[in-house]
Amino acid sequence: MHPRQMEKGSVSIGFVAEAMACIRLRGLDPEGVLRQAGIAPDLLNAPHARVSSRQFGVLWHAIAQAIDDEFFGMDRHPMKVGSFTLLCHAVIQSDTLERALLRALRFLRLVLDELSGELVCEGEVAHIVLHDRRMDSDRPQALSAQPRRAFAHGTFMVILHGLACWLVGRRIPVMGASFCDDAPPYADEWRVLFCQNLQFRQARSCISFPATYLALANIQNERSMKAFLRDAPANFLVKYKNSAGLAAQIRRRLRAWPPASWPDFDEMARQLHASSATLRRRLSEEGTSYRAICDELRRDLAISLLGDTRRSLVDIAGELGFAEASAFHRAFKRWTGARPSEYRHPREG
């Protein structure tokens, strides 16, 4: 497989740690589960480490099989293996997004005990509001409990938003997202998944989007659902990321070329019909820079290549546009806090 096909984005190691909490609580073998997904256990000790979206998707399935729960054991009642497939069957015949969301929320209300969602429209804005019986019954204790509920609420929203985007064949823009709990260490990850307007310690957990999207037609069918399910849930974490803005436009351009051929900053400005000063200012307003964008893309491709191929580090360094392997080593350590060799590990079986 060509490396450009493998580069599908990466996921914070914080997601992995939260997902693995249910394995540790049940006294199961965490290293065995991690290795099924091709994730080196030592990466959990590197707070800036990341894994490929494919690895996290495999991990999601491995955990579900280990505990018979597709929701990481975060509700009193397990979302047993096969529940997400049945959820898709429940909504596939809906003619509009609104009807599909109402069916999805009703289905999840039947499957889960503590978490339930509600679709609320206020003028031109629609909200998916999450109710959590555990937090509502004893908020002070719930807020101080470990593991916290932020990951549970975020996962619930990721599932619903990803499903909704797939049904209408486009990304539904999130206008705002709020969560009851404190901001987790991986909050920036949610800014990429949802939107920049992210708030914590709010009265309710919800995501908001333009109500006009509720009238969009469901363009999917039984045949397309089969292909969708082959890639779920990893596709939620990559395909429907926040794609608005200049930085996202530049990422799409760069992904079309191998890193060794990426244009320098001034050339990119010319291609975008902007002056270098204007491009620098507009990226700064989005909280990033051209170098940061290039580094993030190189990092994600490096993680994919290290985990999915047996190519030498010299070859990978060259693929990423580094003249020497030593320069790649230093950059990778700066990006992830780990050495490239820590992403080389034996798999089970």
Image (spheres, rainbow, N blue to C red):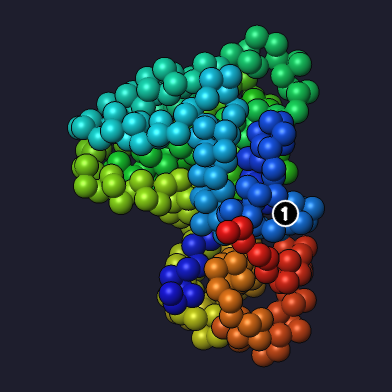
Give how far across and how far down residue 275 sits, in percent. 53, 76
Residue 332: x and y in percent read 71, 71
- Residue linked to disc 1: 41
Q: Residues within 10 Å of mark 1 (few under 14, many from 20)?
A: some
What is the number of callouts on the image?
1
Residue farthest along the bottom direction in this orientation: 323
From what the image shows, is residue 154 above or below residue 77? below
Residue drawn at x 44%, y 51% is 235
Query: Label 1 amino acid?
Result: Pro
Decide if residue 188 is in sight here: no
Q: Is residue 61 visible?
A: yes
Which one is in front, 17 or 331? 17
- In the depicted structure, whether residue 102 falls above or below residue 305: above
Q: Where is residue 81 in the image (x, y as percent from the top left)?
A: 45, 34
Whether residue 196 is situated above or below residue 246 in the rendered picture:
above
Q: Residue at x 66, y 65 (%)?
A: 346
Horizontal side of 140 relative to 170 (left or right) equals: right
Q: Quadrant of the C terminus?
A: bottom right
> Looking at this view, is 148 or 120 the one in front?
148
Element at label 1: helix
Q: Which residue is drawn at 72% across and 19% down?
A: 142
Q: Where is residue 284 in the image (x, y as percent from the top left)?
A: 63, 62
Q: In this view, does 42 lie to the left or right of 78?
A: right
- Report whether 250 appears left or right of 343: left
Q: Is residue 150 above or below residue 110?
A: below
Residue found at the far top of this picture: 137
Q: Quadrant of residue 202?
A: top right
